[in-house]
Image: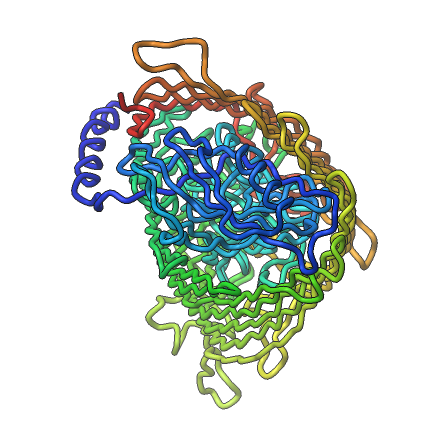
Amino acid sequence: MSRWATCLPLLISLVASLVGRAQPAPEVVPPRVLAAPPASAPLTPNPPGGATVVLRVLVGVTGAVEGVDVLESGGAELDQAATAAVRLWRFAPATRAGTPVAVRVRIPFVFEAPPRANQETDAGEPPAPPSGSASASASGSEPPADAGAPLVVALPAPVESESAPLPPGVEEVDVRGQQRKVERGGSDFQIEVGQLATIAGQSPESLLELAPGIFIANEGGAGHADQVFLRGFDAEQGQNIEFTVNGVPINQVDNTDGHGYADTHFIIPELVKNLRVIEGPFDPHQGDFAEAGSVDYELGVPHRQLMAQVQYGSFNTERALALWAPEGEREGTFAAVQATQSDGYGTNRANSDASAMAQYEGELGSRGLWRLLGTAYATHYRSAGVVRADDVANGIVDYYGTEDPSQGGDAQHFSISLQLIDPTNDGTLTQQLFLIYNGIRILEDFTGFLLDPQLPGQSEHPQRGDGILQQYESITAGGRGSYRLEGKLFGQSQAIEAGYFARYDHTTPVIQRVKFGTDTPYEYDEDLVTDIFNLAGYLDFELHPVRWLTLRGGLRQEYFDYNVQNLCALPNEFVPRSAILDVACGTSDAAGGVRLPDQRASATALITEPKVTALVQLPVGFALTGSVGEGAQSLDATNIMQDEQAPFSQILAAEGGGLFHRRLGDFDTSARALYFYTHVGQDLAFDPNQGRLTLGTGTTRQGVVAAVRLTGGILDESASFTYAYATNDNDGTLVPYVPSVVARSDTVVTGRLPLRFGDHAVQGGAGVDLSFVGDRALPLGQNASPTFVVGVSGNVRWDLFQLNLSIQNLFDAKYPLSEFFYASDFHHAAYPTLTPVEHFTAAPPLSVMVGLAVILDKESRP
């Protein structure tokens, strides 16, 4: 730790010098909306087609509204309602070179019945018809309110500076926004991280657990992708969930560990502003792998700062972070780098990694935005893998030990993407291009010596072991784009969007068997070269037949083209890789010649996926919602047969329930209660013999979800409960490994402490997270026990310095993180047995992490 502490002043001075060199000429950073009470319209009917009031608002250096003018009138009564509402708005003031300045912004209020009640990202407030919704995206994306809910309903127009002379000392600024996010019913969880970063901002996976019903495990090591459970799905390493970061895909096609493998460890958690989790296939934007749902990490740093931080914790865990979010730039402009290393808890768990992410967000035309994002990541890690429960009970292996110390891996990830958002008079045009490289090496051992085959011509041989060495490289290129048109029809707001998605993957997956305790291969299980094209087009609509009813949905057409070259179609004993084409996998034909193993297969697939959501507005913030959707997941290249239709796993899902969103006193409150149903035509199941997911039977899932979030003042509370009943269609047995109940509560309190030193007050935050995971079904009628875990976190800031503390597994609960039930033989008994037994990976024990950050921002200046 001392060497990192020595480097901290040097790191700060280096980044500070870069700030000084790279800082552009000071520009005005627009004000950011902090709270926006709605306009209460008079009870008289609105004019046909609704009405719009456009205000020019003077925001002072304190963020208070100091003046309001009506630029476009919607009638005297509506003008008065909009003016009264905006005078209660609160802003973070605009700044130039870090100094608050007064500015004028243009804010339109659209008076019409709110389209829905559960508005965690769109404007509109308590849905009391008629009401006024306003658009004020002053920071480049949807502005967060007190409640943590963005307020954007429509993209704002640029300020017209010629409309009136500027008062002395007042700046005129353009207000820019991006295409608003359309909510997809009850299972669309759009989570602003906000204060919850105090307890969930430790890693990308802890942020993901803020979404209801998600439970994270890991049996492969710190650098291995996490195992995700969601609503009765064992999505393994993300194979059943579509993962993106700022729209860039993360899932890896034909990865040897599982088709759709999604490693999120390259994401620096301090850069995640919002998280969107759609549970179910209800959005036409969702593509391949969105069987259980989709996850998008939205990046941004609202608080402009220069920060350097070092952390040290249990098991010699060290982390260093440098983050630069320059003042004078938009919140989508940032750069950060982190490095981590640890001995890990228990045996064979050491790891190290480094990650860098940088994005620039610039202006495009009068109202548009463009973003250029680059990421880089590399890791090396050891893995304890699974251990037999009876070996632990008999004292042969420690609870935190390993059966095979050779397990571990490496991974590399690099990506670059360009995104354009160009609002027009009636709609919004978006375009994104991306290029990605992934490289992975994973060595795992699930069964010991159970499957080692006999050598040809020999009755027996020394056992070599069942180690599985997986190697994978991929190049991914593609893009997505859309045009969304909004307007009035039949007196109501209507919208339609047309879009496309295109992706090409070139992959080289290889699986070999290796000798126990080494990485020496002796046999090929798989050796492929694949070229896969995924093209999709969709239509997405938002219709309001009447004021109280909203219909959303559309059609998605998915097309796949596979070209698979199998270099080991006829597996045989291992020989050097250079000789594979003429010897390694060959065999003699009847004429005595050599039959080469090279075999090609090509196939295509086409599927249409309809999706629809209905929202019925009720009084005082309530709404009813119902959704039905079809989805599909492609299967990996090993299932491709020449000239046959490429296989898909088809999904039919439905849900219904009630929503609530309203400001109650000082708290913005949102809640929901839902019933869900999902049927999968062919599900994936974990096969320990292959160390990966394989095609299984159809499955059905039913259950309920309840969630609530309260945000206001110093408190932020998020709580959820999910019950899932998942069964196999063929025999009605429970789907193994998935938890029946997942419940979680996250509570954070932040504010100014009653302490002051010098010119600076002391600020702080504290949080507690409670996590309960119910029993999990195992094969052959077995069950895994429930678990309950508590974590606490906190921070204290004074002047430039912030001290952070995180304690996970506060009561040092000893429990399995991942559990399995199958046969194995690690030569610990005189006579091997084929009887299935429990295997598990131990969860981390009590872990403490402390950190010291130096933060340069306007709050730390005199």
The residue at 17%/37% (across/down) is 17
Name the outermost residue toward the bottom: 591
Q: Against 446, is 321 above or below? A: above
* Left or right placement of residue 753 versus residue 841 in this view: left
Q: How is the image coloured?
A: rainbow
| Image quarter in which the C terminus is found | top left
Q: Against 162, is 634 above or below? A: below
Q: Is residue 401 visible?
A: no
Q: Against 491, is 114 above or below? A: above
Across and down, in percent, residue 73 comes to 56, 51
* Left or right placement of residue 856 versus residue 244 in this view: left
Name the outermost residue toward the front: 76
The residue at 53%/88% (across/down) is 590
Tell me the quarter of the picture where residue 741 sits: top right
Q: Nearer the viewer, residue 579 or 439?
A: 439
Tell me the quarter of the picture where residue 326 sits: top left
Across and down, in percent, residue 800 comes to 30, 22
Q: Is residue 847 visible?
A: yes
How many badges with numbers are in the image?
0
Q: Nearer the viewer, residue 346 or 828?
A: 346
Across and down, in percent, residue 104 comes to 40, 43
The residue at 50%/43% (across/down) is 274
Name the outermost residue toward the right: 732
The residue at 33%/70% (across/down) is 578
Across and down, in percent, residue 366 comes to 38, 59
| Image quarter in which the N terminus is found | top left
